[in-house]
Amino acid sequence: MSLSLARCVEAVARLLDDGGSLEPVRLCMSDGGVQAEVCAGGPAAWESLARLAAGTGSEASGRAGDRDGGVLTADLEGDVVLVAAVDPPRRHTVRGPRTTSTSAAAGLLRELAPWAASLDQELLPGAQLWVEDHGNDFTVRLLVSAACEDELGRVATAAGTGLERVRMWRTDSGLDGQGSLPCGRAVQLAVVCLP
């Protein structure tokens, strides 16, 4: 069953609201569900995963103190499937005092929901909306695919729906680009041509 990207974004925003304070989370949302990666290690990662589990009424598998920190699979409202796990911080994640927050991430998702709804109207199969919390800022990225080289332009135009100042450039795998939402939030775009 295919879900709307906007419903997925809204369900994750509510989950973050209910989860309390979490370590930075990297999200990949699609019309099939959401993948959440807690970007931390040790007890803090496990506590964040446990808070996500509590927000879903589920339990994470694994044990506190496990090197991998556990895995959570849960059904959210509206048939959205959540798969969450712990992933070590990436190189762009700020170490030290954090200036982002879980509530700011939830607010960003609510800000993105109307744009996600406009993308749903463009019928972009397999679209993935990534939101990554770096600890000092968020990155928003939309990844879509084109069936063939001839479809790149149409898919890129559809992916840019609702964005301002969209710029696209050619890459080995298709097109990359950037635009901004009317509020000024930058959005990275990638259109991959499938062989």
Image (cartoon, rainbow, N blue to C red):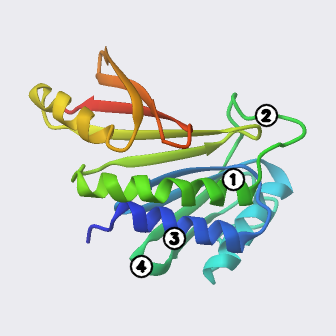
Q: Position of residue 168 (x, y in %)?
A: 34, 21
Secondary structure under tag 1 reads loop
Secondary structure under tag 3 reads helix
Task: Give the camera-side residue of 3 and 195.
Answer: 3
Q: Quick one: label 1, few (<14), some, or many (20+) residues within 10 Å? A: some
**Residue that carries the numbered disc 3 in the rendered image:** 11
Residue 14 placement: quadrant: bottom right
Camera-near label (3 vs 2) is: 3
Q: Position of residue 129 (x, y in %)?
A: 44, 48
What's the distance in space between the residues labelled 1 and 2, CA to CA? Answer: 21 Å
As drawn, 171 above or below 108: above
Could one spot residue 195 in this view of the protein?
no
Camera-near label (1 vs 3) is: 3
Q: Earlier in the sequence, mark 1 or mark 3?
A: 3
What's the distance in space between the residues labelled 2 and 4, CA to CA? Answer: 34 Å
**Residue that carries the numbered disc 1 in the rendered image:** 68
Task: Give the camera-side residue of 180 and 55.
Answer: 180
Q: Residue at x 73, y 60 (%)?
A: 103
Q: Amino acid at mark 3?
A: Ala
Q: Is residue 72 left or right of residue 150?
A: right
Q: Earlier in the sequence, mark 1 or mark 2?
A: 1
As drawn, 30 above or below 170: below
What's the distance in space between the residues labelled 4 and 3, CA to CA? Answer: 8 Å
**Residue that carries the numbered disc 2 in the rendered image:** 94
Secondary structure under tag 2 reads loop
Could one spot residue 84 in this view of the protein?
yes
